[in-house]
Image (cartoon, rainbow, N blue to C red):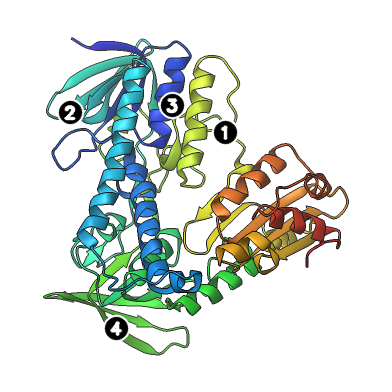
Amino acid sequence: MAKQFDVVVIGAGPGGYIAAIRAAQLGFSVACIDEWSNAKGGPAPGGTCTNVGCIPSKALLQSSEHFEHAGHAFKEHGIDVAGLSLNLPQMLKRKDTVVKQNNDGILYLFKKNKIAFFHGRGAFAGTAEGVHTVNVTGANAETLTAKHVVIATGSNARVLPGAPFDEKLILSNTGALTIDAVPAKLGVIGAGVIGLEMGSVWRRLGADVTVLEGLPTFLGAVDEQIAKEAHKLFVKQGLKINLGVKIGAITTAADKVTVAYEDAAGAAQSVEFDKLIISIGRVPNTIGLNAEAIGLALDERGFVVVDDDCKTSVANVWAVGDVVRGPMLAHKAEEEGVAVAERIAGQHGHTNFNTIPWVIYTSPEISWVGQTEQQLKAAGVAYKAGTFPFLANGRARALGDTSGMVKVLADATTDEILGVHIVGPQASELIAEAVVAMEFRASSEDIARICHAHPSLSESTKEAMLAVDKRALNF
């Protein structure tokens, strides 16, 4: 006997569980299906983000940063640490604890909002008279029906042809988070968010890290000035970053993996690593969804085809997050999940792609929102730029972290803020002010006139806004 609901959500990652909660808040009967399992076989909602992505990586980034500070930076603060040693099993255990806390938090939210949770894999079985049927396969098989279905099945790591993940020597983001001993030599293919974050973690813990990137430029999506500053700082820290390479054969033998590649000058190279992380992007997770059962349209890359409102080709079937067009970001998925639930309720949910912030949680952190200087130039938009270095910020000096800067781009005529780019301490937190400003179409003058607490890192944002008009006060 099928269990009936108003809304069924397939996937309990950031887009899915948030969509389910918002739909329940709006008075719908809601079910959410998710197949992630913990080490004991129990449910582990939260998707890639919670289980093998955002949350565990940030836990390890924080732990590894503490370790590096204790070994290098504490002495300057008058703190002498004798006999410093790494307890990697405890560090990984803490990471797992943080993950479980988030898993349990989502299960609690489902219970609080009276959402029926089904642990298993969801797949379409058909549609009849406007009602969709979804089968749940797993230890407790079920059949669910609903007028509305939200697809939030996320994404998987892209496999490099000829180098499948074994999660022992050749690692995806999943394996990169569970290395049980610090590798002497670690290779990373892909200088994107995941590659730089994971490379940073293991470098801090003692690995010799080499990053191989196929593109000729470093962080091509980032404002060029910010990317150049970040590159300089990462190289200074000890990351070996090779750009413009062409990856050749990848071979494994015993406990080593060898990568043959052609460098930017065209010379043949070969390097041996103890572990190799491959982070060359992600692909939509639609395999097993049985999209054909309801005539659901997928594009040539496997993404669910949606319009601007996240409506698919099938009536009352919606899709959000990594499985659809747009940036693969947890917070983008959340915003779409809320918007879809509100649209189902007849409201006007909204997601503004122009004000979605991006963050790379390295040290220094990199964050940005809006357009880069190169994008404005390419579009022929007249703009003004203002920058302010953390070197001139009192709070940054007190923290002992003065690397990087804040950069503001504003329309040359209207002064409307078009983009804000930050590399430096706590950039992930500082970018929120810029997002709010841009959402309300503020001018650089507006933020420059707002009183910011002293001493604070946020004063650097104010100073960069002032610098747009060439009137920074502290630089």
Q: Is tag 1's residue or tag 2's residue first in the polypeptide sequence? A: 2
- Residue at image coords 18%, 61%: 166
Tell me the kind of residue under disc 3. Answer: Ala
Local secondary structure at mark 4: strand
Marks 2/3: CA–CA distance: 22 Å
Sequence order check, earlier mark of 1 and 3:
3
Element marked by disc 1:
loop
Q: Residues within 10 Å of mark 2 (few under 14, many from 20)?
A: some
Q: Nearer the viewer, residue 17 or 266?
A: 17
Of the residues shown, which amino acid type is indicated by label 4?
Val
Q: Is residue 288 above or below residue 260?
A: above
- In the rendered image, residue 44, in percent from the top left (x then y), is placed at 25, 36
Q: Are marks 2 and 3 in contact (CB under 8 Å)?
A: no
Name the foreground residue: 291 vs 144.
144
Which residue is disc 1 drawn over? Answer: 308
Q: Can you identify the residue that label 3 sits on?
A: 19
Dot 3 or dot 4: first in sequence order is 3
First reached walking from the N terminus: tag 4 or tag 1: 4
Q: Residues within 10 Å of mark 3 (few under 14, many from 20)?
A: many
Query: From the viewer's perspective, is the residue at label 4 or at label 1 nearer?
Result: 4
- Measured in 3D between alpha carbons, the distance from the residue under mark 3 to the one under mark 4, in whole angstroms, is 46 Å
Kindly tell me whether residue 392 is visible in this rendering: yes
Mark 4 lies on residue:
271
From the image, tell me which residue sits under label 2: 137
The spot of residue 33 in percent (x, y) is 28, 27
